[in-house]
Amino acid sequence: MKPAPFDYVRATSIDHGCALLAEAGGGAQLLAGGQTLMPLLALRMSQPFILIDIGHLPELQGIAPHAGGLRIGAATRQADALANPLLAQALPVFVTALAHVGHHQTRNRGTIGGSIALGEPAAEMPATAVALRASMTLRSVRGARTMAADDLYLGPYATAIAPDEMLVAIDYPAWPADAVPLFREVARRPGDFALVGLVGALAIVEGRIERAGIAWFGMGPTPMRARQAEQALVGQAIDRIDVQAIADLAIADSAPFDDGHASAAYRRSVGRRIFASSLAQALDRRLAA
């Protein structure tokens, strides 16, 4: 199929892009990497009357220290983020998760902000933002506002980003350099959306968990924080943790569903297994260090 007719405008700045969004009154789409948008246009599942290209704007790109953590520009290419040494050192679990996004061809064009703003519940980047407590900076002609990743996702492909708003940056708070990463996903093929996935990190101080951030993907209508598991882990000595009990708590904070790829029962069973094994392996590595 071919896309429905639309106008194309190359924004000259963030302010220009926001003005175009406001003028469009909900009829515009932002183009950054286009790895999801282009197929949707071709299938006429998305029919904007104006396409606003922001992918080239330098103020939307780059990775830099910010407020004690890291700020990633929304239009930063996924491939560039994968190759960034600062990101690899500060947030290794982010890089691990990013390496599972699509394929190397799509990562050359796909952007960090595009993946996060899309709101695919089985995607890695939205869940990573939730797990690591990222915050989003949104801009419009009305000004700027900040929103926690926890508050961003309302349902499948539905976010709290207003039609006239642009995601301009994602801020990730600092995690200790020796934080223990957690990542596992089950997919039919490399590059496919996950049937079941988990991502997160544990900060461990003197043998006890001081901080925990864990989220599911592919296990509900949005990325889902494993809040009960996080709370149960904090303060625990790592040699006394009952991983099966923590896995049960984590599953309780998911909402698996039946679809054409897997059943809710399958997702629940596999999720419990990969959570317990991932947590056990992470703790064993720390104990052996």
Image (cartoon, rainbow, N blue to C red):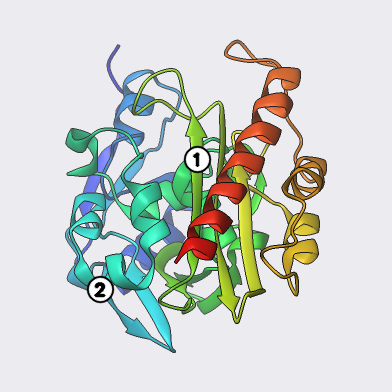
Q: Which residue is drawn at 82% across and 42% down?
A: 252
Question: Residue at 33% across / 43% down in the picture?
Answer: 50
Q: Quadrant of the C terminus?
A: bottom left
User: Which residue is found at the position 37% from the left and 67% from the top?
Assistant: 19
Q: Is residue 163 left or right of residue 78?
A: right
Give the spatial CA distance, label 1 vs label 2. Answer: 23 Å
Does 167 sit left or right of 247 as displayed? left
Q: Which residue is disc 2 drawn over?
A: 86
The residue shown at (77%, 52%) is 242
Q: For residue 184, which numbered disc appears in the image? A: 1
**Towards the viewer: 178 or 101:** 178
**Mark 2 element type:** helix
Q: Nearer the viewer, residue 53 or 34?
A: 34
Comes first in the chain, label 1 or label 2: 2
Amino acid under disc 2: Leu
Relative to 285, 228 lies left or right: right
